[in-house]
RNA sequence: GGCCGCGUAGCUCAGUUGGUAGAGCAAUUGGCUUACAUCCAAUAGGUCACAGGUUCGAGUCCUGUCGCGGCUACCA
C-alpha cells in the first residue's frame, strides 16, 4: 500500500490493493463496524443474472448503491449492503442451450434432465465468479459473507414456503387457461415477458361459407377452424336478427359450429363489425367465450402446427396453413377483401419466438382473490381486513409508504397494477425452482417437503424466475424464520435501487410477495436509474457492436473515473449518454485531486492530531471555509435526497474551481507571510481532509489512497469509517 | 387508442418550494507559473420548441400546438 507519491495518479497501481485491504478490514460486514451508532441501514443488491458478464447498466446501479452505502456508513449507520446473483431461469437456460448447440451440436433433450442441469450449473458458476470479480473491481463495499443466490438451498426453502402459503390461501391455483406459449422456447411465459413487435400483416375479410350471413375479418385465417362463435355488438342493427342462431359448415375440410352472440367488447366500426371468436387461441376471445359459456376447440399444438383437418393443413405450420386456407377461400369465392395493415405481433422477450396463445393446464397467482390480511401490527392494514394482492400492491406505494424516485413512476406503477391480470408462474423449463406439488392419480399434494408414501410424482415444471426474485429482500435476510436476526434488524430495507425497466417484473412482484407474506413493505424508497446509452444516445447492444465494457474503461481510466462519469449529469430515472470523453474528463478530475493532495501534503509534513475546524485570518481563508461549509451542507442534503448528480457536480466545482483554482493559488502568496503560514497550511489540510471524506463515496479508491498519505497521528484504518463532516449551526 | 416523459450553449445534460440562465466535453486566444500541460488564464456561444395565460416577475405554474422518446393496450 505504501507507494511513492507519484507525479500523477495511475489507478492501476492501487485499486486491487485498496480493495483487498477493505475486505481484510471486515468492515463491509456491519457486525464489525465501530459501535458509534446502531441504527441499521440496508440495501439489498438487485442480483445480476448469471448469464455472463456485467454491463454499464450494472455498473451504474452498483455505483449508486455503493455511494449511498458508503455515505451512510460514514454517517455512522450500521450499514448492510447484501450482494447476490440471480439464476434467471429462462435467460440462463436458453444461453446454455445455445452454447450446447453451437459447441456440441446437441439439443436440450439429447441430455437427461440431471445432465443438462449440471451443464447449466457449471455455466452459472463461471458467470457468478466473473460477476463477483467485476463487482469487486467496481469497488462495491458489499458484505460478501452474506452473499446469496436465488437458487441456493436457503432461497429454495423460502420459495417452497411462499408457494405453500399462497396455495393454502387459494392465491395460487392450477387451471386450464389460454396462456402465452413460446413456441421456440417451448414454455409458457407471463404477460410481462411478451414483447410486441410492429409488423405489416394482411387483414382478410371473408365468409365461413356461402350460407353464412355475416362477413368477418381476421389476420389469422388458419385459426378460424377453431371458431365457435361470431360476436357482434348488441346495438348493431345490421346483425340483430342473427343473434342466438347457430350455423354448421365445413371450413377447408374441418367441421365448424358457430353461434352468433352479442357482446359489448366488439367494436362496431372495425372491419365488418363482427368478430370470429377463437376461444382456444386468443386471450380476449377466451374471455368472451367464458362470458357466453362457449366451447373451446384447440386447433394449434405446442409446436405451432395445425392439429385438425385433412392433409392440406394438418401437421402444417400455422403460417403455411394460412396460405392454404386463403387460397381455399379464394377458390370457393368466399374471400371479399384483402388489405394490408400494421399489426403488433406478440414475441417472447428472451427467445424472440412468436407467441402462440393456446390453452394449457398451468399454475397462476390470483391477484384479485379476496383473503383476510393475516398480519398483526402491520402499517398496511389491520389484521383480518379483507383484501387482495392487487390492493396490497396499490396500498404499498404512496405518500405514507414506499416512495418511488423519480416520483412520476408512481403513476406508471399504478397504471400497470390497474391492468394486471393473474400471473402465470409455471414454466416448462428445467433450470429453476421445481414446483412443490406432487400428484398421485387424482390426488394433489402441496407442501414444503415431499409427501410420504409410494407413487407420488412431483410436478415437472419450474417457477417463473421472478417468483423467487419477488422474495429477495426477505429470503436474503433469513425469512421465513421470523426470528432471524438479520430479518428483524434490516427488514424492511431502506432503499431498493434498480433500473426502471424492471419496475413491473421485479419491484411490483417484490411488493406483492412481501406484503402478503410478512405484512411489511420490502423497502422505504425505490430509487430508479435509467438506461446507459452510447455517446449518440443509441441503446447499447451486441448486435449494434456499440457495447462499452466497464472493465475496459476501468483498465484505461480507473474505477473512480468510471463511477464519477456514470453519475455526473445523470438525474434519477433518466437515460444517460456515456461518451468516452466524459470518462476521460473524470480521470483528469481524479488526477487533479491527486495533485491537490501532493501540494497540500508537501506543506504539511509533521504529524498532527485530529483535525478541528480552523479559523480564517484572511479574506481568502474566510471565503474558502464558508464555501466548504456550504458544500458540506449541500452535498449532504443532496445525498439524503438521492440527488447524486447534484452532489457530484458541487464536489467537482468546489474541489477544482473553489479550492484548487482560487484558494490554493491564493495560499501560495499567503504563505510568504510567516505569520500566516501555519494557519494557511492548516486550512489547506483541513479542506483536503473534508474533500476526501465527501468525495469518498463517489471515488473510493483515490480518496482512500490519499487519506493514507495524510499526516495525522490518529487515523482510522480506512477512510470508509471516517466520520462524515457535520456543520454545526 | 390510453398513460408517462422530453424539447435549455456545437454535443450530452443539470437546473429541489417562480426571483439577473449553469456544468462536463468540444471550440477560440494566450501561457511549459517549481501540485497538476491529465494543467493554468481568458474568450465566445442560448429570444430555455412554439403560442397564449396567471404573476410585480415564468426555463420553472396553467392551457393549447408542433416535434421526439418510452411504457401500456392489442382493432379481431
Image (cartoon, coloured by chain):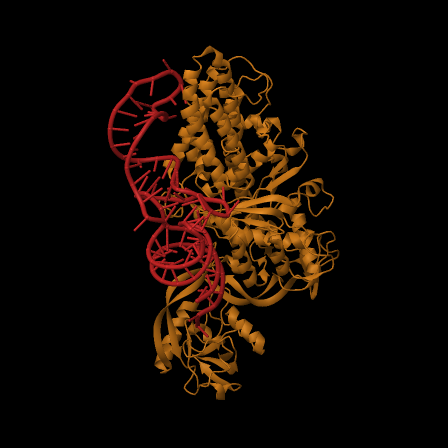
Chain colours: A orange, B red
Q: Is residue A434 left or right of residue A12?
A: right
- As displayed, is residue B32 above or below residue A171? above
- As displayed, is residue A372 above or below residue A687? below
Q: Nearer the viewer, residue A251 or A34?
A: A34
- As displayed, is residue A232 above or below residue A609? below
**Which quarter of the rendered picture does the C terminus of chain A lie within?**
top right
In this view of the protein, can residue A113 be seen by the observer? yes
x and y, in percent, of residue A561 in the image? 44, 32
Q: Nearer the viewer, residue A386 or A379?
A: A379
In this view of the protein, can residue A90 be seen by the observer? no
Residue at image point 47% right, 77% down:
A276
x and y, in percent, of residue A411 in the image? 53, 56
- As displayed, is residue A170 above or below residue A41? below
x and y, in percent, of residue A431 in the image? 57, 50
x and y, in percent, of residue A404 in the image? 55, 50
Residue at image point 66% right, 41% down:
A490
Q: Nearer the viewer, residue A334 or A215?
A: A215
Amino acid at each position: 500500500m505504501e507507494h511513492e507519491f507519484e507525479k500523477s495518479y495511475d489507478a492501476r497501481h492501487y485499486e486491487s490493493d485498496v480493495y483487498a485491504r477493505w475486505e481484510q478490514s471486515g468492515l463491509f460486514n456491519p457486525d464489525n463496524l465501530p459501535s458509534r451508532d446502531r441504527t441499521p441501514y440496508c440495501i439489498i443488491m438487485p442480483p445480476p443474472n448469471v448469464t455472463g458478464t456485467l454491463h454499464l447498466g450494472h455498473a451504474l446501479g452498483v455505483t449508486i448503491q455503493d455511494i449511498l452505502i458508503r455515505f451512510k456508513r460514514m454517517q455512522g449507520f450500521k450499514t448492510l449492503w447484501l450482494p447476490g446473483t440471480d439464476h434467471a431461469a429462462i435467460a440462463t437456460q436458453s444461453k446454455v442451450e445455445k452454447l450446447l448447440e453451437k459447441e456440441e451440436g446437441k439439443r436440450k433433450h439429447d441430455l437427461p434432465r440431471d445432465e443438462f442441469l449440471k451443464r447449466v450449473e457449471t455455466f452459472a458458476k463461471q458467470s457468478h465468479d466473473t460477476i463477483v470479480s467485476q463487482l469487486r473491481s467496481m469497488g462495491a463495499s458489499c458484505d460478501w459473507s452474506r452473499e446469496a443466490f436465488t437458487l441456493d438451498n436457503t432461497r429454495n426453502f423460502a420459495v417452497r414456503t411462499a408457494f405453500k402459503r399462497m396455495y393454502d390461501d387459494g392465491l395460487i391455483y392450477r387451471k386450464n387457461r389460454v396462456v402465452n406459449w413460446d413456441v421456440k422456447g417451448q414454455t409458457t411465459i407471463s404477460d410481462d415477458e411478451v414483447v410486441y413487435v410492429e409488423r405489416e400483416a394482411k387483414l382478410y375479410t371473408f365468409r365461413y361459407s356461402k350460407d353464412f350471413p355475416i362477413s368477418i375479418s381476421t389476420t389469422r385465417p388458419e385459426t378460424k377452424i377453431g371458431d365457435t362463435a361470431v360476436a357482434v355488438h348488441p346495438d348493431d342493427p345490421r346483425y340483430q336478427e342473427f343473434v342466438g342462431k347457430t350455423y354448421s359448415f365445413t371450413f377447408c375440410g374441418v367441421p365448424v359450429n358457430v353461434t352468433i352472440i352479442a357482446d359489448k367488447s366488439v367494436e362496431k366500426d372495425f372491419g365488418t363489425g363482427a368478430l370470429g371468436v377463437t376461444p382456444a387461441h386468443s386471450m380476449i376471445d377466451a374471455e368472451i367465450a367464458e362470458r357466453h359459456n362457449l366451447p373451446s376447440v384447440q386447433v394449434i399444438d405446442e409446436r405451432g402446427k395445425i392439429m385438425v383437418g385433412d392433409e392440406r393443413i394438418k401437421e402444417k405450420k400455422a403460417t403455411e396453413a394460412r396460405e392454404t386456407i386463403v387460397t381455399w377461400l379464394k377458390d370457393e369465392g368466399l374471400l371479399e377483401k384483402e388489405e394490408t395493415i400494421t399489426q403488433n405481433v406478440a414475441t417472447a422477450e428472451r427467445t424472440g419466438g412468436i407467441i402462440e396463445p393456446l390453452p394449457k393446464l398451468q399454475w397462476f397467482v390470483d391477484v384479485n382473490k379476496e383473503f383476510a390480511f393475516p398480519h398483526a401490527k402491520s402499517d398496511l392494514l389491520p389484521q383480518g381486513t379483507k383484501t387482495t394482492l392487487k390492493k396490497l400492491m396499490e396500498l404499498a406505494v404512496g405518500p405514507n409508504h414506499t416512495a418511488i424516485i423519480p416520483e412520476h413512476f408512481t403513476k406508471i406503477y399504478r397504471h400497470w397494477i390497474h391492468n394486471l391480470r393473474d400471473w402465470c408462474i409455471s414454466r416448462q423449463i428445467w433450470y429453476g425452482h421445481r414446483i412443490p406439488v406432487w400428484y398421485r392419480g387424482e390426488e394433489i399434494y402441496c407442501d414444503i417437503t415431499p409427501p410420504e408414501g409410494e407413487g407420488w410424482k412431483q410436478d415437472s415444471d419450474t417457477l417463473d424466475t421472478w417468483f423467487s426474485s419477488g422474495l429477495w429482500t426477505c429470503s436474503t435476510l433469513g425469512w421465513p424464520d421470523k426470528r432471524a436476526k438479520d430479518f428483524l434488524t434490516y427488514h424492511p430495507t431502506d432503499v431498493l435501487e434498480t433500473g426502471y425497466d424492471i419496475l413491473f417484473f421485479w419491484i411490483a412482484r417484490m411488493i406483492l410477495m412481501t406484503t402478503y407474506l410478512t405484512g411489511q413493505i420490502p423497502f422505504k424508497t425505490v430509487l430508479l436509474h435509467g438506461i446507459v446509452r452510447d455517446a449518440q444516445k443509441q441503446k447499447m447492444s451486441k448486435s449494434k457492436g456499440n457495447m462499452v465494457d466497464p472493465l475496459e474503461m476501468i483498465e484505461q481510466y480507473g474505477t473512480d473515473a468510471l463511477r464519477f462519469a456514470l453519475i455526473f449529469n445523470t438525474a434519477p430515472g433518466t437515460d444517460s449518454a456515456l461518451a468516452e470523453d466524459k470518462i476521460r474528463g473524470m480521470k483528469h478530475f481524479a488526477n487533479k485531486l491527486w495533485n491537490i493532495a501532493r501540494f497540500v501534503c508537501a506543506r504539511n509534513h509533521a504529524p498532527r492530531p485530529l483535525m478541528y475546524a480552523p479559523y480564517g485570518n484572511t479574506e481568502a481563508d474566510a471565503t474558502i471555509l464558508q464555501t466548504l461549509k456550504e458544500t458540506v451542507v449541500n452535498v449532504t442534503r443532496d445525498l439524503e435526497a438521492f440527488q447524486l448528480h447534484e452532489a457530484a457536480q458541487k464536489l467537482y466545482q468546489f474541489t477544482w474551481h473553489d479550492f484548487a483554482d482560487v484558494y490554493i493559488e491564493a495560499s501560495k502568496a499567503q504563505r510568504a507571510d510567516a505569520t500566516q503560514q501555519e494557519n494557511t497550511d492548516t486550512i489547506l489540510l483541513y479542506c483536503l481532509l473534508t474533500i476526501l471524506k465527501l468525495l469518498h463515496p463517489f471515488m473510493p479508491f483515490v480518496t482512500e489512497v490519499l487519506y493514507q498519505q495524510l499526516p495525522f497521528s490518529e487515523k482510522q484504518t480506512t477512510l470508509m469509517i471516517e466520520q462524515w463532516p457535520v456543520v454545526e449551526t
